[in-house]
Amino acid sequence: MKQSMLPIMLMVMLLLAGNVHAQVETADDLTETGIALYWENDFEGAIFQLNQALEINPRDVAALHYRCAIHRVYGNVMEALADCTFALQIDQNSGEAHSSYARLLAVLATLPADMEAALAEADLGVELAPESWLTHFNRGAVLSANEAYPEALDEYDEAIRLGMEHPHVFFNAGTVASFTLWDFQRGLRYWNPGLELYPDDPLMLFYRGSTIMNMGEFEVSL
């Protein structure tokens, strides 16, 4: 009897192992989908996917710091802090988690020392993950919040060089160049490639038209 039960037990163990592996893959897929929806500004869809991923794997650092970013957008401060700090407890060497935390600190900053802390986190994010477009994008956003606009544009340029092709980077950089520094030529360097990738983006179409109009080229903007 014992010998006949052994093959059955082995089969059950293999099936269980396979289910665990499938769950891990499903969690990764859910996180990947959630991240894609985040960059499409579908925050409700994104957080739904990330919540499901974290039910399967509560220690998924990417899911945590992206959910932190969504809570930041919604103004859910305590939830954002919980997700970012937990992500960093799991992996202190995650440059992207540090950069997401930096964005949150910049939003919460009320004193110069607060912004210094945000900048330090953003710097650490880039130091830990220098080849990640996300760390450079987030550092650019923190620098822009600190009114260090030329340095912010340098970070956005680096994010683009590293392969960031989401409309956010072109929009952020174009807005800073055209309507903060009033450098319209540089603004077009962001609006034009951004619209090549996303020709129907209404905000980029509007702001490129405004940029051209400010240059005095009214006919081209029409």
Image (cartoon, rainbow, N blue to C red):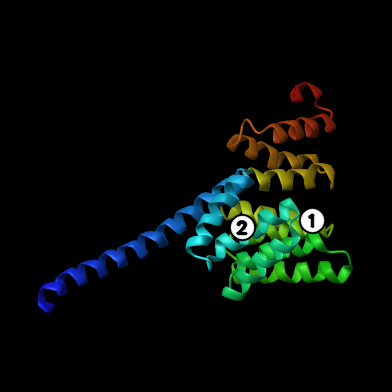
Label 2 SS: helix
> Can you say whether 91 is above or below 41 in the image?
below
Q: Residue furthest right?
A: 111
- The residue sitting at 62% across, 66% down in the picture is 97
Give the label on residue 186, or none. none
Q: Which residue is mark 2?
A: 66
Foreground residue, 76 or 101? Answer: 76
- The residue sitting at 26% across, 70% down in the picture is 13
x and y, in percent, of residue 162 in the image: 57, 55
Look at the image and tell me in which quarter the C terminus lies.
top right
Foreground residue, 1 or 169? Answer: 1
Foreground residue, 45 or 140? Answer: 45
Using the rendered image of the protein, determine whether residue 68 is visible from the camera's viewpoint.
yes
x and y, in percent, of residue 43 in the image: 63, 47
- The residue sitting at 56% across, 60% down in the picture is 63
Give the label on residue 144, or none. 1
x and y, in percent, of residue 100 in the image: 67, 62
> Can you say whether 70 is above or below 129 in the image?
above
